[in-house]
Image: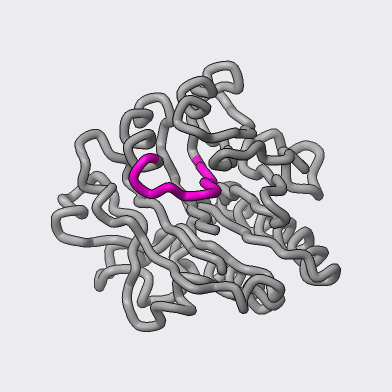
Amino acid sequence: MKIATFNINNINRRLPNLLRWLKSSRADVVCLQELKSTDADFPADAVRKAGYGAVWRGQKTWNGVAILARKAEPVLIRTGLPGDDDDTQARYIEAAVNGIIVTSIYLPNGNPQPGPKFDYKLDWFKRLRRHAATFIKHEVPVVLAGDYNVAPTPLDIYPTRSWDNDALVQPKSRAAFKALVAQGWTDAIRELHPSKPMFTFWDYKRNRWPRDAGLRLDHLLLSPALKPRLSKAGVDRNIRGEQGASDHAPAWVVLK
């Protein structure tokens, strides 16, 4: 079972890229972020013609998350992260596919920091940890997939000082990610590639893709029930180099 996460950065603009990748990757489950599409404008017909059932939660201009399943219909569980009824941002969706619960997470960026956007990021992280703890408690097979907007360690960003004030690399951001993993989750990419950068994001500015000036922001965390099934994990880097590409590349795991 191949499960991927891909910040598509505007699903309608990148639809040709997405469809090409779906055909080549043959991922069984695909978690998308930054749809930048309303619910009504989600390209459901094109996705279905590609062989995927889908659930999604859109939002005009920004955010938006979806879960696709190849030759299957994801069973929608929730379209928001519990814990704050006033939070209307489309950043979390959860579904069951073939006996596994899968999430698509688009964690807040948090910039500029310090400030209310960074506070929102940290608060969102706390809510995610509370919700994730219930999965651990009940020993549910879960993949917490998505764009976490955190480069967890110095290995997860190219050598530079230019991001030092960015919310993606702040000690509090990294501590929040570490506290989540410490519940018992396995960072699948890092588990199988402990010493490689494995970047998933290259900013459009300053020639960062040609320079391989990347960050690892997109993660797949496996619950203890799934760790023994982890057989492969990787990043489809070449997707970032395509014409009209997202600034992210898909990250994926294969479960036995």
- Residue at the spot 51% in from the left edge and 42% down from the top edge: 32
- Residue at the spot 32% in from the left edge and 37% down from the top edge: 20
Camera-side residue of 159 and 48: 48
The number of discs equals 0
- Residue at the spot 56% in from the left edge and 69% down from the top edge: 256
Q: Can residue 62 be seen in this view?
A: yes
Residue 253 x/y as whole percent: 49, 63
Residue 120 x/y as whole percent: 64, 50
The span shown in magenta is 23-33
Camera-side residue of 117 and 30: 30
On screen, residue 43 above or below 31: above
The verdict on residue 126 being magenta is: no
| Residue 156 left/right relative to 145 | left
Residue 197 x/y as whole percent: 32, 72
The verdict on residue 28 being magenta is: yes
- Residue at the spot 50% in from the left edge and 57% down from the top edge: 2
Q: Which residue lies furthest to the right in this view?
A: 138
Camera-side residue of 37 and 205: 37
Residue 154 x/y as whole percent: 37, 76
| Residue 49 left/right relative to 115 | left
Q: Is residue 167 visible?
A: no
Q: Residue furthest bottom?
A: 195
On screen, residue 135 above or below 249: below
